[in-house]
Amino acid sequence: MSEDYCTIREVPKPPLAEGPPYAECVLCRKPTEYPESYKGITLCPVCEWQEAQRTACSG
């Protein structure tokens, strides 16, 4: 068995916004902590936490 089976990989996050306008969460459409100008997937804190729970290693 590989030792890095449950290794957590650092995924780059978008820079936090200094204020509105905020990007919408791609799952629930609520405002995120990220700037609207960010190109890429953005998740609100709740969806980000739920996604981390889904992808966490259960081993």
Image (spheres, helix red, strand yellow):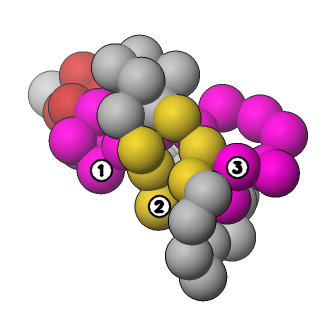
Find numbered disc 1 in the image and state the secondary structure of the residue it sits on.
helix
Residue 23 in sight: yes
Reading the image, the residue beneath label 1 is 45
Compute the Cα span from label 3 to label 2. 9 Å
The residues colored magenta run: 34-49
Tag nearer the camera, 2 or 1: 2
How far from the left and from the top, in percent, is residue 42? 57, 39
In the rendered image, the residue lying farthest to the bottom is 18
Quarter of the rendering occupied by the N terminus: top left
Circle 3 sits in a helix, a strand or a loop, which is it? Answer: loop
Disc 2 to disc 1, C-alpha distance: 8 Å
Please, what is the three-letter code of the amino acid marked with disc 2?
Answer: Glu
Mark 2 or mark 1: name the one nearer the start of the chain.
2
Residue pointed to by mark 2: 33
Residue 19 to residue 53: above or below: below
Instruction: Give the amino acid type for the residue marked by disc 3 in the picture.
Output: Glu
Image position, residue 58 (x, y; %): 15, 28
Residue 47 or residue 28, whichever sits in front? 28
Q: Nearer the viewer, residue 53 or 3?
A: 53
Tell me the number on the disc at residue 36: 3
Identify the amino acid type marked 1: Pro
The quadrant of the rendering that contains the C terminus is top left
- Note whether residue 11 is visible: no
| Drawn side of residue 58 relative to residue 17, left or right | left
